[in-house]
Image: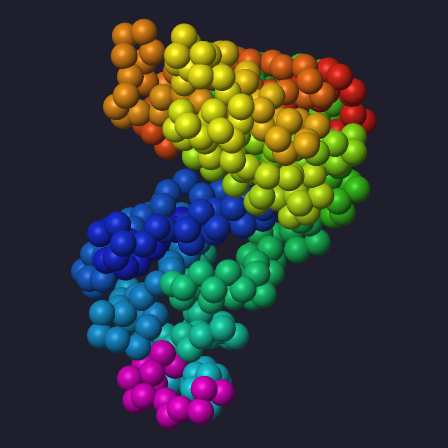
Amino acid sequence: MNAEILAVGTELLLGGIVNTNAQYLCERLAGLGIPVYYQTAVGDNAGRIKNALKSAFERADIVITSGGLGPTEDDLTKETAAAFFGRELVMDGEALRNTRRVFEKQNSEMPESNRKQALIPEGARAVPNGNGTAPGIIMEEGEKTLILLPGPPSELKPMFEEHIEGYLRKRSGNPNQSFFSRSVHITGIGESMAEAMMKDLIEAQGGSRSLTIAPYAKESEMYFRLTAAAATREEADRIMRPVADEMRRRFGDNIYAEDGRSLAEVVIQMIRDRRMTLACAESCTGGLLASAFVDVPGASDVFLEGVIAYGKNAKISRLGVSARTLGQFGEVSEQTAQEMATGIRRTAGADIGLATTGIAGPGGGSAEKPVGLVYIAACVNGDVSVRELNLSGNRNKVRAKTVTLLIDMLRRTLLAGAPAGPLT
């Protein structure tokens, strides 16, 4: 059994809205063990929606749509779906009462146009919407199933988790079996090399229907998701354990987490465990490094401050970088990065000082110092490590990669100085 996602809405094609619903649905379906091979986005046009449904059902057993269930004339998903299966629309009393209740809670009268939302294709099942006026719809036609969901994520997500997920689990033929996942996060190894190191394990999964391994790439890191079909989490862990153990043997300390934590979360916890404190000084990353740490709940336990020292004067007055260093080596240099890291550590009174300086582009580069040249530095209890990076990509990618690589450099420094306990 496989599924296909069909997102409806002209605004998706104009770039006005990012299709986060498709990402969410694919992730949830993967957790149910239902593969998605295609995604489609189509505008608010009955003919094109009908053609998209036809193509989708030629490929998939289950088609899940999002959007187009509103009260306006251009909300056509339900009407087109009913026509596609040759069914009439009929008023669903409970759906109409639910829609009315939404307006009653707002002390307002329900517009007549909202009655349209309570029309359901004959023989279909209305799915309650506890966060909006449009019910979801489940239509079964032979071996095929069409699930219509509202477009707003605040309505789609709870509806899927409260009503659709259980329905699909039963449809999978294994109502007592769930899918449990474990993500092994890796950094410091390129995507192609990491996949090559896992090739035999990925190929071996073909002989087992109970375990799947899927690679996912991110900026300067990647992860492998292990998914096991089992009745309990304990049983799933037993299935996944041999592969996870082998991955630890192969990747060593390039694995930074197996519990879904971000790299910054892992490092914040390492600093907390060592009763240390952290401060950072940023030039080219402009606050992105501090933001990565502040995004972690409870980071205030260890993160003291962040300084954006973009110009020469700020580096001199705030961080104590010497004018001589800047004059001789320049702002983008190993020496400047080192003095920035030691300076922020000293002035903040922290155990750890981190620093970034570089040329993120698109301009500002030269033959001697091209765009993408970045220096990162970590000063831990007075010992300084500096690394030169030569990064590719646009301005935002250079900045994002810099942050990831510096946080990972600190992680490895802490591991080398005071090894933490085993990953769980």
Residue 378 falls in image quadrant: top right
Which residues are the magenta region?
A: 105-118
Give left or right: position of 205 versus 372.
right
Q: Residue at x 27, y 70 (%)?
A: 75
Place of residue 293 in the rendered image (x, y in percent of width and height, measured from the top left): 59, 39
Give left or right: position of 173 versus 249.
left
In the picture, the quarter occupied by the C terminus is: top right
Give left or right: position of 8 versus 23.
left
| Most foreground residue, 278 or 263 | 278
- Asked if residue 182 is positioned above or below residue 337 in the image, the reply reads below
Place of residue 342 in the rendered image (x, y in percent of width and height, measured from the top left): 60, 21
- Asked if residue 137 is positioned above or below residue 309 in the image, the reply reads below
- Asked if residue 294 is positioned above or below residue 196 in the image, the reply reads below
Place of residue 173 in the rendered image (x, y in percent of width and height, measured from the top left): 61, 52
Q: Residue at x 55, y 16 (%)?
A: 338
Q: Residue at x 22, y 69 (%)?
A: 74
| Most foreground residue, 126 or 128 | 128
Q: Residue at x 75, y 17 (%)?
A: 417
Q: Tell me if residue 229 can be seen.
A: no
